[in-house]
Image: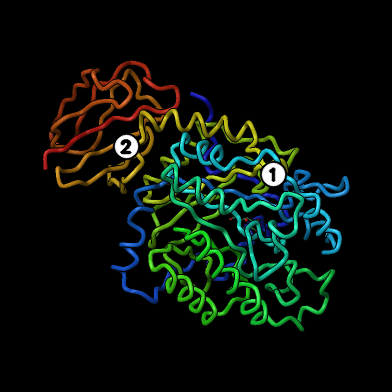
Amino acid sequence: MATILIGVVATSHSQEFKDGTIDTGDKYENASLEHYESPEIIKKRLAWWEDARFGMFIHWGLYAHDGCHWNGQYGRSEHMMLKLQIPIAEYKKIADAFNPVKFNADEWVSIAKNAGMKYMVITAKHHDGYAMFNSPSNAYNIVERSKWKRDPVKELAEACEKQGLKFGVYYSLGRDWHDPNCNSIKGRRSNTWDYPNEEGKVLEKYIEGKVKPQLKELMTQYNPAIMWFDTPEHVTKTQSLEILKLIHGINPDCIVNQRVGNRLGDYAVREQKIPETGQPDPWESCMTLNHTWGYNKIDREYKSVETLIYNLVDIASKGGNFLLNVGPTGEGVIPDLSVDRLQRMGNWLKVNGQAVYGTSVAHIKDFKWGKTTQRKTKDGTTLYLTIFEWPKDGLMTLEENLDIKEVSMLISPDYPVSYKKNGTSTTFNLPDVAQDPIATVLKIKLNE
Ligand code: FHN
């Protein structure tokens, strides 16, 4: 069994505090959420999303043009403009040259679909302030200011519609290095080289002059099912609420994540980590395939497919969603190593997907061979035991007194799995060796 690296991730420095924790610009990152709507409304809104469990995150923008490099300098990540303190006048020249001729929205959506992903979230505007969509309210956008002049957000929204994936957009809320009025906590993540007077910045002008007009455009032009905000920084509670009401005024079913700020939003975000246990609120772990969100032409340290499938099942076993990122190139191509990992995850999910989609936390005591999930339907409860470490001689004893109707392995449903019960425990007699090189799922239908 290949080594599975549990939750091991190294991010690039410009996003970290000295202690290595990620600077998400969210003061309330670990606080439980508060809601301005009834729990019923939020439960209904999240229903498809909680069943979906697995989505594609896409970080794509001008930083991909030369793979997080600028003028031969290494910019490390999508934070390149901040890292190298690139003046806006210079950074704009990247827009003028940006020409992703190989971009194919149907192909991107097919890659996500074949990976077993049910939704997709693309960066409509990242910290550099450049709109990767048609934004009549702000000329610093890909349709008006690029060599390419197409609208990738529109094309991806249509491709998702066609192929049955839910579509979402990412919007950098409290960080914008192009806008003269966007400040940040202690100015750490602000453009202080073009706009040195941090105290003089009036965030309200940015929210009213850029954010709200662009959110209206995103909601009305592309009807996203998810608004994925990032780094709320100094956004006030009033502003967070106004933004939520603006979005729900246009589409009451649009899901908004925690980073709208101030403990609001429908679900919590856990970045580059998997919590030890389930969370008080619905939650999603977003993670890179390598070390960088944006395309970094020298970062080829990709996680193994074993680690990625382990992370997906681990997250599902704790009732969470997995938003796995790709960073397409400046030409508009999803890197080969990303496609490889995703394709192989899809192959495993084609056989074992029912152990992930539409499942919830299964309370099986000390299951040391892997992770457990369950699905409750009107026909009863089905347990899924995803085995990553094969039990010695195929003998697996659970300290559970299970009332079993039927038991089988998803990869070889005809193999007769026998079991013996003695009082409080149940022993399963499995084949001597693992049936799948990554993980084998045991499906146990219970008599209710
Ligand atoms: O600074 C961003 C980073 O570039 C990336 O977008 C991640 C994705 O969740 N969020 C911020 C860091 O927390």
Q: Position of residue 147 (x, y in %)?
A: 77, 50
**Residue 216 screen position, x and y as percent:** 54, 70
Residue at coordinates 55% horizontally, 54% vertically from top-left?
Answer: 271
Query: First in sequence: mark 2 or mark 1?
Result: 1
**Residue found at the far right of this picture:** 71
Secondary element under disc 1, as helix, strand or loop, is: loop
Tell me if residue 333 comes above or below residue 269 in the rendering: above
Q: Residue placed at 33% from the left, 40% from the top?
A: 372
Amino acid type assigned to the residue bearing label 2 in the image: Gln
The residue singled out by tag 2 in the image is 354
Q: Residues within 10 Å of mark 1 (few under 14, many from 20)?
A: many
Residue type pointed to by label 1: Tyr
Q: Residue at x 50, y 49 (%)?
A: 158
Q: Quadrant of the C terminus?
A: top left
Residue 43 image point, x, y percent: 32, 63
Residue corresponding to mark 1: 295
Name the secondary structure under disc 2: helix
From this view, report whether residue 430 is shown above or below residue 287.
above
Q: Nearer the viewer, residue 310 or 370?
A: 310
